[in-house]
Image (cartoon, rainbow, N blue to C red):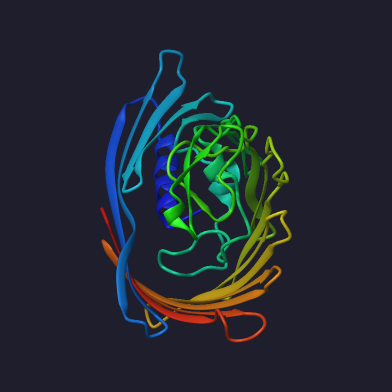
Amino acid sequence: MNRSKLMATTALASVMAASAANAEMSISGLYAGTITDAGGGGMASGFSSNSIYVSYSDSMDNGMGVSVAMSLTAAGLLTDVNFDTGMGVIGLGNGQDSSADKLDGSPACFSLNVCGAAEVAGGYNDGDSLSGDSMMYTNSIAGWTVKVSRGEGVKSAAATAGVMIDNDDASAGLIAIPASYDAPTGFTRLSGTASSEGHDPVMSYAVKGSMMGATIAAGLSTIDYKGTTADKDPSFVTVGYSLAGMSLGYAMYDGDNGVEETQYGVGTSMAGMDVGVQFVSQDNTSDTDMTRVSVSKGMGAASFGLDYTETDLAGGDTGDSTAWNFMYVVGF
């Protein structure tokens, strides 16, 4: 779960915790930018979040609480409607995500605004992108937060007729593609549509709470495809613990696709700044190790951070990289 989603979720939780006896409305915003120097290849800048959040809460005639949260980002407008039934919260909308996505943030990461779940691409998929407009049930039981979500199902679609061109011999001209098959390897489709594989509604389950001073979270998503793609049940476990002024973090993300990622991290405060080190190891056909050193400073409405990240691929120097990231976050 990325940092902007975390902030939006925290704001929504604050609204739901407020009394539903009186209507309340709030607006907030966030801008998170990054300046990167990757391996001495020159400076590049961008932003990881550019968002405005609007939330409204009130009560219905039967005493149940209702809230609406809207987030406007570069990716579009996301809207959540939540009903507090007194026996849990039922959420609807295109911003619900999957339950695993809500709780799988890594306590081993101490970066200012790049912390999420798994760090190395190609492994863990929490089901968020496949869920679509989800329904989510949230409840607190004996100090533990429990979430269950159900996403949208997608039908498989057959290819439609069109034309293609030979990538190696464009002079051959356009070649018709019957609706019965897709363009073969070595050809580029110019019109018509390729077949697409659908999937059943994504079910996701997650829980988070405290035990013996440690903050523990775990979750599982079930992704069942309608075609030849293998079904997957990705899962995660995270543990955070504070000891003698230090924050210790552990996270494990299993993609159920032969890829597993483990993270360890330690952070503390020093000279008025927050500092931390994160170690990441992904087990794959080509194993990847990553180390990130993070320093950040909060200054009221603005915060600043600096990361040094080193990535090593097994089997030699090919694919290895280093990067410096200067980050700034401004919120209101």
Residue at 40% x, 53% y is 4
Measured as percent of width and height from the top left, residue 89 is found at 53, 30
Horizontal placement of 139 versus 74: left or right?
right
User: Which picture quadrant has residue 120?
Assistant: bottom right
Location of residue 30 with respect to 88 vertically, above or below: below
Q: Is residue 40 above or below residue 187?
A: below
- Residue 190 in which image quadrant: top left
Left or right: 185 with respect to 69? Answer: right
Query: Is residue 300 in sight in this rendering?
Result: no
Residue 119 vs residue 123, the one in the foreground:
123
Q: In the image, what residue occupies the spot 65% across and 32% down? A: 200
Numbered-mark total: 0
Q: Measured along the vertical axis of the image, is residue 266 above or below residue 164? A: below
x then y, percent, for residue 57 = 36, 30
- Pinpoint residue 8: horizontal percent, then vertical percent: 40, 46
Is residue 211 something that shows in the picture?
Answer: yes
> Which residue sits at x=52%, y=68%?
109
The percent position of residue 99, horizontal first and vertical second, equals 59, 42
Between 307 and 230, the one nearer to me in the picture: 230
Residue at the (64%, 59%) spot, across then down: 238
Q: Quadrant of residue 18?
A: top left
Above or below, 58 relative to 26: above
Seen from this angle, which residue lies furthest front? Answer: 172
